């Protein structure tokens, strides 16, 4: 797939993958540090719902950033969008490390998520010119490893930082400094004269392409599936360390370490799904996505049924299996499927909207899931997410079947 690549192409791919891995070091830190923050701020009345409100607000800004970032990448180029995400993450992680009150924390984390949202549409835009059409699935699967294994690596690093005795503020300070150091190399590589200029279509061509995109039923079906996927994915990312601590009775450092296996399982999944994507007919690819959502929903319901009787090992294993079902197909949606639907003119817009609608669902993973867990317990939270996933998967399968029938009759 990459035979005959130039040195500059390899450099771009390396920068994108390393950069997005560091994005997750500047994002997973709140999930890992939330217990320490709640303990320190308990006298001020902080609870899980307080952190949940902060993360839900930030996720709303992340969703907004996806919509805007996709348009920016299609208009100004993927490099511009990606670098905006890098510098925004640095600034707002440093601000978060200095925080002390709920409004300041909320503003800093919302700013961090907003600018990080520009990163992935920028990567999709740049990747469209890197991979041939027959290898889009595998190519985007490789790029997607940056945020799946990036999450895995970042949680491991953050867990080690906790074991070393660092406070929660250092979990935001040091990742920001690491991303700042990386930004020097990123600017040098992405602005290098050795790289070809990104092709940008005329404004009227982009407008027409956007109209066609928004008229396509497949595009809106992808947005709907992304809503369910992202709700499940963000819940696992944000709350798994807490579940392992409260239900599995693990210490915070061990919970952070165990939660790292979730993105690891997702990385294996995305490689498998990417390989399948390139080998099935276009009108069959939707079944791969919907099938993953259905499998993950069944796993969530099974975990809810036996949640409090599961030992920590099985609790971690069950969550990792759900991640395997959810994360690979979701990566397909916001990567290869977006390139398929958006084409050269609007691939970043397609990715931004599919991801953005997904993160509207992800907003519920913060305050909504926290409120559900506080009022009814984690069993109710898992069962509700599983049921929603099954409903969305069923609707997705119905859409794929109807689309195939229309295609066959055309």
Image: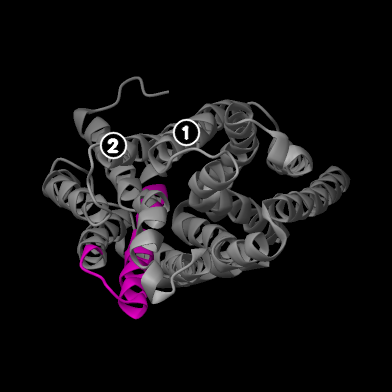
On the image, the x and y values in percent for residue 155 come to 37, 40
120 left or right, relative to 178: right
Few, some or many residues within 10 Å of mark 1 (<14, 14–19, 20+): many
Residue placed most toward the observer, 276 or 224: 224
Q: Is residue 220 magenta?
A: no
Q: Is residue 4 above or below residue 248?
A: above
Can residue 376 be seen here? yes
Residue at the location (83% across, 49% down)?
394
Point out the residue furthest to the top here. 3
Q: Disc 1 marks which residue?
A: 258
Marks 2 and 1, Cα distance to the nearest angstrom?
Answer: 14 Å
Q: Is residue 115 magenta?
A: yes
Q: Looking at the rendered structure, which numbered label has been put on residue 163?
A: 2
Few, some or many residues within 10 Å of mark 2 (<14, 14–19, 20+): few
Q: Bounds of the magenta span?
A: 97-124
Helix, strand or loop under label 2? helix
């Amino acid at each position: 797939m990459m035979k005959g690549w130039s040195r500059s192409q390899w450099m771009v791919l390396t920068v994108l993958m390393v950069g997005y891995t560091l994005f997750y070091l500047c994002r997973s830190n709140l999930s890992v540090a939330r217990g320490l923050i709640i303990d320190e701020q308990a006298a001020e009345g902080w609870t899980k719902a307080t952190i949940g409100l902060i993360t839900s607000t930030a996720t709303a800004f992340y969703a907004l950033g996806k919509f805007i970032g996709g348009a920016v990448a299609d208009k100004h180029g993927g490099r511009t969008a990606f670098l905006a995400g890098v510098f925004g993450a640095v600034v707002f992680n440093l601000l978060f490390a200095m925080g002390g009150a709920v409004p300041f924390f909320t503003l800093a984390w919302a700013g961090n998520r907003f600018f990080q949202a520009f990163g992935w549409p920028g990567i999709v835009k740049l990747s469209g010119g890197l991979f041939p059409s027959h290898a889009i699935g595998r190519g985007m699967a490789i790029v997607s490893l940056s945020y799946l294994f990036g999450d895995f690596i970042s949680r491991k690093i953050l867990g080690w930082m906790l074991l070393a005795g660092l406070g929660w503020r250092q979990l935001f300070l040091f990742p920001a400094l690491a991303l700042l150091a990386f930004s020097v190399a990123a600017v040098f590589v992405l602005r290098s004269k050795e790289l070809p200029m990104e092709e940008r279509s005329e404004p009227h061509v982009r407008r027409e392409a956007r109209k066609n995109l928004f008229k396509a039923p497949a595009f809106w079906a992808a947005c709907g599936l992304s809503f369910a996927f992202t709700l499940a994915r963000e819940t696992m990312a944000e709350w798994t360390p807490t579940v392992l601590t409260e239900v599995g009775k693990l210490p915070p450092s061990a919970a952070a370490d165990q939660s790292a296996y979730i993105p690891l399982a997702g990385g294996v999944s995305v490689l498998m799904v990417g390989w399948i994507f390139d080998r099935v007919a276009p009108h069959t690819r939707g079944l791969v996505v919907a099938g993953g959502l259905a499998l993950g929903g069944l796993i969530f319901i099974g975990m809810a049924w036996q949640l409090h009787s599961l030992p920590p090992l099985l609790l971690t294993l069950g969550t990792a299996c759900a991640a395997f079902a959810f994360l690979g197909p979701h990566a397909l949606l916001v990567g290869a499927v977006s390139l398929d639907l958006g084409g050269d003119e609007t691939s970043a817009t397609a990715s931004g909207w599919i991801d953005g609608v997904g993160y509207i669902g992800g907003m519920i993973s913060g305050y909504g899931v926290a409120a559900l867990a506080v009022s009814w317990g984690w069993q109710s939270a898992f069962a509700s997410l599983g049921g929603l996933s099954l409903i969305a998967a069923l609707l997705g399968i119905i859409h794929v079947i109807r689309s195939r029938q229309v295609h066959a009759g055309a």
